[in-house]
């Protein structure tokens, strides 16, 4: 008895062994590469999500109530990753706030940072 089977990559009918899932080596490679690439993307997304959450939790811990100025080193020591942020807000004065969800920071002179809470106006139109 024979089952009609098709390649899960391209849909072509499969001939030969009953456990084959692909019509050819090239389809098998294509499918395997797609899975690998997808896994890589997923891992990267998970990594970035985790980094953002960690950043946000560090900002929250260092600034439980509103604005706080601290040495930038405190963030670094806590494992803050400056590469990851969710939003940039530039003020009229040209200051740039880097936000991680509902917390953010502004780099200050002398290796200090000002930690702030996200404000609704930060979602408004840019001021140029
Ligand atoms: Zn195929």
Image: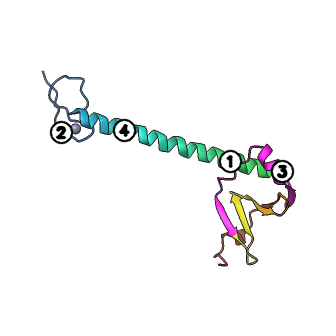
Mark 1 or mark 3, which has the lower sequence index?
Answer: 1
What percent of the width, then of the height, locates residue 28?
A: 28, 34
Badge 2: few (under 14), some or many (20 or more) residues near its Cα, within 10 Å? few
Q: Nearer the viewer, mark 3 or mark 4?
A: 4
Q: Secondary structure at mark 3?
A: helix
What percent of the width, then of the height, locates residue 41?
A: 48, 44
Q: Where is mark 1, residue-wise?
A: 53
Which is nearer the eye, 73 or 23? Answer: 73
Q: CA distance from mark 1 to mark 2?
A: 45 Å
Q: CA distance from mark 1 to mark 3?
A: 14 Å
Q: Is residue 128 above or below residue 17?
A: below
Magenta residues? 62-89
- Using the image, tell me which numbered label, if any, was put on residue 107: none
Q: How many marks?
A: 4
Marks 2 and 4 close (CB-CB < 8 Å): no
Q: Where is mark 3, residue-wise?
A: 62
Residue found at x 54% / y 44% = 44
């Amino acid at each position: 008895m024979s089952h009609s089977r098709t390649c899960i990559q391209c849909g072509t009918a499969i001939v030969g062994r009953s456990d084959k899932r692909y019509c050819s080596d090239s389809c098998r490679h294509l499918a395997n590469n797609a899975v690998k690439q997808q896994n890589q993307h997923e891992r990267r997304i998970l990594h970035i999500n985790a980094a953002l959450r960690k950043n946000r939790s560090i900002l929250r811990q260092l600034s439980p109530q509103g604005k706080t100025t601290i040495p930038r080193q405190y963030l670094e020591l806590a494992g803050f990753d400056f590469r990851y942020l969710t939003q940039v807000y530039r003020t009229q004065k040209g200051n740039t706030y880097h936000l991680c969800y509902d917390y953010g920071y502004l780099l200050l002179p002398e290796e200090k940072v000002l930690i702030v809470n996200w404000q609704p106006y930060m979602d408004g139109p840019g001021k140029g």
